[in-house]
Amino acid sequence: MEKADVVIAGGGLGGLSLALALKEGLGRDAAITVYDPGFGKPLTGDKRCSAIAAGARRLLTVLGVWQQVGEAAQPMTIMTVTDSRTRDTARPVFLTFDGDVEPGEPFAYMVPNAILQQALTDAAIRAGLDMRTAPVSGFVTDRSGVTVTGGDGATVRASLLVACDGARSRLRSLAGITCTEWEYGQSAMTFTVEHERPHHGEAIEHFLPAGPFATLPLPGNRASIVWTEKTEDARRLADLPDYRFQEELEQRFGHKLGWVKVEGKPQVYPLGFAMARTFIGERFALVGDAAHRIHPIAGQGLNMGLRDVAALAEAMTDAARVGLDFASPQVLERYQRWRRFDTFAMGMASDTLNKLFSNQSDALRIVRDIGLGVVDRLPRLKQFFIRDAAGLGGTVPKLLRGEAL
């Protein structure tokens, strides 16, 4: 039987970030094993881009990852919110968020997932992580540790097993942890476009009755599109001939950035909500999408996962440095208290926003537009929202403050 300090199931953006954070906090001699059947496979299949909030960027900088992302990261200098029907020619602006969370620090950046994943993978190799191209097939926990069986046939004895294996986490099910969940009947089409005029770092969230249509800036005259529709409509639109899809896109994209051209085929992702009843078990923790799944309306999915990473790594590091068991119930409970309320609040806020905006009600439209206008006239309230979305509200873990563990 092999030994490790921590086994992580899932080597995606959250799993590798946690592995690097634990290597930083527990020391270079810490044995961290990461299982993922996708290791070594090409990363070009994922065309999605993610909004990396200021706090998450600080975390990635401390871990030595952000430096490699470099020119692929596009700062967001302003967020504009509009609300109209698809057929409306005029798109009144009801709310804008601009400025920095700190002088010279934008509140978010846009980064292609594949580039960020490659930077994390390279950093993991440099750190000497034990990366295994296999899934975790099973585990047994007891009071002193967890015995993990990998799909490669190896058995590893560790102090803690962390599930970072996504929204449909198999390990969460094996641990007997249930979820509160529902589907929205919506799907997001994601793809990249080239456009005529410069975007100047502006992100636009255009609320339509079927769901939000987000134009998110990328380097050059390019943007990432997250287009939400009812699931049956999203599938129909994605299957249209290129010229018909282009026509539907132009109707929603508008003319502000001039002509627009789609790069590649759209990818379609069903949207739903899920919240694990508990984020922890005996010698076991959930991180990222394995613990929670929220609507992408506020662009907080990955950022919530990286906040989990920062909180769990700090709780474990603090315990280890005073000679305590970093996987004890008390340490894991500290992680859960730190993250559960914030996660639930963000999930409910995203759910409410989606229900408030994704409908045909003229009465609701008037009420929400008045509300947006009121917020737009309250600078302090807007600054509060910006800092909270940037991961800098409440009790902020060290890594999100840009401090080493």
Image (cartoon, rainbow, N blue to C red):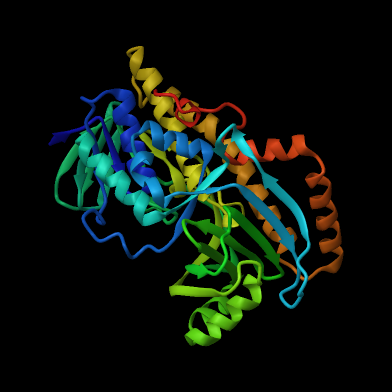
Q: How many marks?
A: 0
Instruction: Find residue 3 and report its horizontal and vertical position in percent.
Output: 17, 32
Q: Looking at this view, is 307 or 205 the one in front?
A: 205
Visible in this render: residue 295? no
Name the residue at 50% across, 28% down. 401
Q: Is residue 8 left or right of residue 262?
A: left
Front one among 4 and 314: 314
Residue 126 appears at what percent x and percent y?
Answer: 21, 37
User: In x, y percent, where is residue 208?
Assistant: 70, 68
Q: Quadrant of residue 248?
A: bottom right
Q: Residue at x 38, y 40 (%)?
A: 66
Query: Residue 251: x and y, percent?
Result: 65, 77
Residue at 25% x, 61% y is 42
Answer with left or right where residue 52 lies relative to residue 96.
left
For residue 302, say whether it is visible.
Answer: yes
Instruction: Judge left or right: residue 62 versus residue 188.
Output: left
In the picture shown, does residue 79 fall above or below 399? below
- Image quadrant where one finds the N terminus: top left
Above or below — where is 275 with respect to 396? Answer: below
Against 239, is 112 above or below? above
Q: Nearer the viewer, residue 24 or 90?
A: 90
The residue at the far top in this view is 322
Q: Give above or below for 278 relative to 244.
A: above
Residue that lies at the very extreme toward the front in this rendered image: 197
- Residue, x 50% and y 63% (percent of image)? 221
- Could you tell me which quadrant the C terminus lies in? top left
Is 46 left or right of 394, judged from the image as shown?
left
